[in-house]
Amino acid sequence: MRPFKYSTTNDINVAVKMLQVKGHAKLLGGGTNILDLMKEDVEHPEELIDITGLSYTQIKSISSGPNAEGISIGALCKNTDTANDPIIRQNFPLVAQAILAGASAQIRNMATNGGNLNQRTRCSYFYDIAMPCNKREPGAGCAAIEGINKMHAIFGWSKDCVAVHPSDLCVALVALDAIVKVMGAGGKERLIQFSDYHRLPGTDPQKDNNLQQEEIITEIQLPKNNFASKSYYLKVRDRSSYAFALVSVAAAIEMAGNQIKQVRIAMGGVSHKPWRAYEAEQFLINKTPDEANFNLAAELEMRNAKPLKHNKFKVELGIRTMVRALTQAMNGGKHT
Amino acid sequence: MAANTPNQNTNMAIIGKPLDRVDGHLKVTGIATFVAEFNQPNMAYAFPVRSTIAKGSITGFDLILAEKSGGVISILTHENAPRLQPFDPLEIKKTGGFLAENLIPLQDNKVHYFGQFIAVVLAETFEEARHAATLVKVSYAKEKADADLNEALLKSSVREGAQLNKGQASAIIETSNLKIEQTYTTPAQNHHPMEPHAAIAIWDGADKLTLYDSTQVIVGMRNITAYFFKLKPEDVRILCPYLGGGFGGKSPAAHNILAAMAGKKINRPVKLVITRQMMQTNVGRRSPTIQKVALACDLQGKLTVIRHQNSSYSNLTDFSEPVGIQTQVLYNAPVREITHQIAKLDMNAPTYMRAPGHAVGSFALESAIDEMAYELRMDPVQFRILNHASTDPVKKINFSSNHLLECFQIGVEKFGWASRKIQPRQTRNGQWLVGYGMATSVHHGVRRPATVRIQLSNDGMATVMTASQELGTGTYTILTQTAADALGIAVGKIKVLVGDSDLPPAPFAAGSSTTASVNPAVLAAGELLRCELMRIAIADPKSKLNGRNTKDISFADSKLYLSSDISISDSYKDIMRRNNRETMQASATATPGGAASGATVAPCGPSMDQDQNYDTHKYSFHSFGAHFVEVWVDEDLGTIRVKRVTTVQDIGRVMNEKTARSQVIGGVIFGIGAALMEETVFDNRWASPVTRTLADYHVPVNLDVPPIDVHFIGKPDPHISSIGSKGVGEVGIVGVSAAIANAVFNATGKRLRNLPFTPDKLFV
């Protein structure tokens, strides 16, 4: 770990200013990822700005504006508190399920929601500074594309990067069309659609998302929806708990009579960003929610997959996971 | 009051009790001090620099930035490190020690594997040392490294390992109609005990060294350290009062030698604790294996041939995975062929890992046995009973004890095996296919010479001393229990000291041998001590036992008493105080295959001379067992859940029902890990592991571990020692992965032959 300066502030505008002025500063929330990265010498900020004293820890209903009747989740609210919040559990169970599918209880107790969005890939080549990695060191090359890439992307990767975004929470958030509220320079706030928040790697995989250097996430907003009774987060992994997804699927359905009125499907473990399965969604609108239709929808989505040497299984696994998640969602999201 | 007669074998009253760990409270309250916690005044911190090539040589170091970095004291490389005595296998062997890897760090510029220690940064703090280590720049002349086992097996560098009847099975296999021939593979695995390898070296001048070292090899480490640094063995002291797990991975290695070198160089105490990443590359591992098994049967289901052909890698060591080891003792078959070939890979040395050979060899053998039974549509337990070897089928001698058939019988009953269907895919529970599987476990029983000294004080306390080891398995506890029986003293009045090379010599803590080796010496030393007490009492005119005959005297509750009249007694304290004995000591060496020796006081009875145990020419020594598992398989998603395990173990006398049970549970969990998730994955382009931390190298989490129902046969082995306890540390893991594979077949009809069974394996 390189020597670094530690500072703290209770004023968001001060924090933004510090990020703006100091190009090599990073924020410290729960510290569950940045500290590991610093110990591994992957990240080496010259300064860590501890923002845990900021006030964005609340979960509250939104009373007015375009997202009225939705909910606002503070960026500094802990993952555990978010998953256990009664309104989240009742109205957005997909979010609670996704959070609880990730990490361990100890990590969730420390980790913040904003930090969850900004956590970095767990690609082992990214973490190993003896290996080339474009995300860590632009232009160095990608060791994973021809290497051990079982855990890597099947959608949206580039020849420069095949890493996947590791979050579970973000898969639920992209499915529910969440909005990320950020504070920028001069107290200027902006809203970012969740599906636009994270990036595909392209030729500059060092950028995980579209946040500006000086911007800080303050809230995650969830618009009101009618998915609560029919949603399910399914994560397939190499052990029962505490492992990153091979494939995960967030599924949410709203019915009109016997037909699907609205459906949301997103996948984790398959791309550089939480992957929204738009093709599958479009196919299912106005269809009956049966296994045959779920299969057709999943196959439609997965035919665009471009697997790598060690993750070909993810294509078929993706289909089956999607079908199962949709089926479970129809069953009321009960665990089996 | 248990009636014990001093001149006869000790009555075992406390031995076998499910006593709580005597060190349990110390551990859960954080008072137990582990190696890395013995901080010293003026201590410097060492952080190793590792090679980033797998083969070649170092052409230069650029240390300018690193040396200028804050807190740096010195940087050791092969250019300035102390020169040690060169590695010489014969000389090392003479010391009674060994090195896990035949490579002394920082002696030349050669690189033998990725991640090799090539420099050490010494600084005032750990953080400063770690940071400066990232600033060390190294240039190399790189050579092509071999990292692929399949490719390396085709090269001329392949050597032959142990061979039994090579080539003799082919003819009969070819002409058999009822047969199976399959290939099974197991991956590289790493030990990953919770405690990383740590050492603190403290030099006293140039010729005395104290080394706190997280090692399983207390005496051996002292001896080889003395050899390498040209010291007298008595001037080296190895200390390790507690070990945070070893699993075979804590042998004399580079970290401890580096700490001693560094301390010598800067003449300050030096601490070196390796990182989890280094535990993937610097402390040994289990080799991947490729195993071909062929079995054939006659129409009655009797095996006619067993062939087990094994491949693994080795490098920088004489050790190679003894994969065929269990195939030498299980099952009768007129023809048996077991071969090993060993490829050279440019990777760090493989080493002992929990149940070497057995753990992976049993996966192939016990899977193949299940496959053969299914070919016959025979129940796999029946098939095993039909082919059971009641005597050692290779050595042609009797087993010292073998209650495997009883293990089957109890397991079948406790598990409810009778409801199992021979045809797969017969039981479904919602999305889950349910299957039952079982396998045999076996592990050789090992006993080595051990010396124990017991000191009795006239305040009633006894101290048991031996340079054995507490791996976390319960050594402190069972030595306490044995001493309690040997002396007739309450458990609370006994203190056990281990983990110090200045104590009487004991074998390294490996091969499930500690219990069988050390406890007989405790009994012997205890017997000597109470004989001495008895002689003093008989000769003491003030003793109620004055003038009595030794054969009429018993002992219990810290007293000697007349067997015929309990009221005629004399306490140890009183005997010692009246005779001005502040302390009394006795020391005994229990030697396998012979009588206890090295007695410092005379025995008073015949029992020690009769200990003609552990004669490996007469008997074949093994622990046995059987695992029964239920798995649920979600075929769509490729996930496997082990739902319950029943295991029955024949480990001879159970020294402590509680710690033994924990050992078996730990072994079964290790086996579940091996079956479902454990794998060190290499990128062959660099010959480096990509599973660098416990986030990538998966071991079971709580949710992966089902209820594990453990049963013991509990019958003492009459030939291993006067106590009759065989090993329990490793047998629990053996066969678990096969039992799970067999249950997955029973659930799904799909045979998984390549460990571990991650979802992608079931899927393809």
Image (cartoon, rainbow, N blue to C red):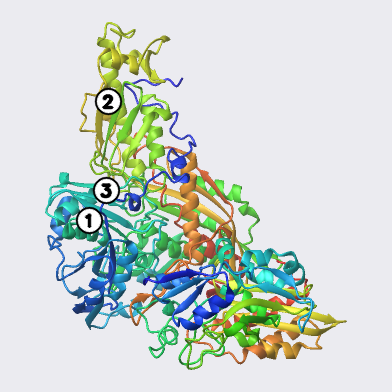
Disc 1 residue crowd, few under 14, some 14–19, many 20+, Cα 10 Å: some
Drawn side of residue A282 relative to residue B608, left or right = right
Q: Say which chain tag 3 marks.
A: B
Q: Nearer the viewer, mark 2 or mark 3?
A: 3
Left or right of B237 on screen, residue A229? right
Tell me which corner region of the image, top left, top right, bottom left or bottom right, holds residue A191.
bottom right
Label 1 vs 2, first from the N-terminus: 1
The subunit carrying tag 1 is B
Q: Which mark is residue B218?
A: 3
The residue tagged 1 is B98
Quadrant showing the N terminus of chain A: bottom left
Q: CA distance from mark 1 to mark 2?
A: 33 Å
Label 3, secondary structure: give it: helix
N-terminal of the pair, mark 3 or mark 1, is 1
Split into 4 quadrants, where in the image is the C terminus of chain A? bottom right
Earlier in the chain: of badge 2 and badge 3, it is 3
Asked if the residue under mark 1 is in contact with the one under mark 3, i.e. CB atoms within 8 Å, the reply is: no
Residue B284 seen in render: yes
B733 and A314: which one is in front?
A314
- Could you classify mark 2 by the number of other residues whose Cα lies within 10 Å: few (under 14), some (14-19), or many (20 or more)? many
Rate crowding at label 3 as few (under 14), some (14 to 19) or many (20 or more) other CA atoms within 10 Å: many
- Residue tagged 2: B528
Query: Which amino acid, mark 2?
Result: Leu
Residue at x 65%, y 81% (from the top left corner) = A181
- Vertical comparison of B653 with B187: above or below: above
Chain letter of disc 2 in the image: B
Which kind of residue does numbered mark 3 sit on? Ile
Residue A210 vs B506, above or below: the answer is: below
Residue B142 in picture, x, y percent from top left:
23, 83
Give the vertical position of B108 relative to B608 (above or below): below
